[in-house]
Image (cartoon, rainbow, N blue to C red):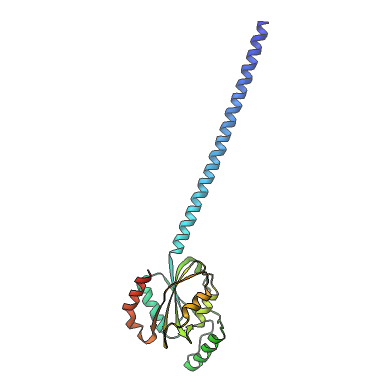
Amino acid sequence: MRKKFILYVLCIICFLLMISFALIAYAKTCSTAINAKNYKAEMQMLNDFIDKEQQVRKADKTLIVYYSYTDDTRKLANMIHEKIGGDILEIQPLELYPDDYNAAYAQGRKEVEERIKPQLNNNFKDISEYGTIYLGSPIWFGTIAPPVASFLYGQSLAGKTIIPFCTYDGLGAGQSIEEIAHLSPNARVTEGFAVKRTEVEKSREALAKWLKRID
């Protein structure tokens, strides 16, 4: 009888040991799974942080993009480039305007009045990398030149800051700011800079003050 009791006790002890070992193994498995899950979550957080940092760096990039029929807007764009750096790119229509002023005048007027957007030679593949865009145009018939309208119409500019600058012959910037805002409704359009095209070289001081004000 005593032997049976001892054997019974040993069986219980073995059973308890087996349960203990099973519980320990299960705890280790759970711990490993939790650690793996935590590691995966931490790696995801790190990747998200890196992605956000890259997006911030992209958003900090500045592009000066402009169209110039004569050299005046080009000169102004280069003056801005000298001051702020960044990248600079000239908008190029697929078909250039005629050299003859009267012919170019007639074509430009028709395009502005009929809101024609000429095809461009640029593809602007990397425009998404820029958070700030300085946008330059001559003023044609009270608004931006049609190639600039084509640029705005063909780009996704949501969330970007557009800083207009222009040269003019007549009475200033006209409706150019409103037109830019109309063609890029989800962008932030700031105060612009306008200068008579014959006075571009004389505008350096005013330009510097404007750049400082919008910074």
Instruction: Report x, y in % for residue 136.
Output: 44, 78
> Visible in this render: residue 34?
yes
Q: Is residue 35 above or below residue 93?
A: above
Q: Quadrant of residue 2?
A: top right
Residue sitting at the far left: 205
Above-or-below relation of 103 to 9: below
Number of callouts: 0
Residue at x 57% of width, y 31% of height: 27
- Give the x, y percent position of residue 90: 46, 77
> Where, quadrant-wise, is the N terminus in this rendering?
top right
- Residue 62 place in picture, x, y as percent: 43, 68
What residue is shown at x 62% (from left), y 23% (from top)? 18
Taking the image as drawn, is residue 122 in sight?
Answer: no
Query: Residue 44: where, in percent of width, then height?
Result: 52, 49
- Give the residue drawn at x 38%, y 77%: 78
184 with respect to 19 (left or right): left
Relative depth, front residue between 76 and 115: 115
User: For the C terminus, which image quadrant?
Assistant: bottom left
Above or below, 201 relative to 123: below
Horizontally, residue 186 falls left or right of residue 2, namely left
The structure residue drawn at horizontal position 58% and vertical position 34%, both measured from the top left corner, is 29
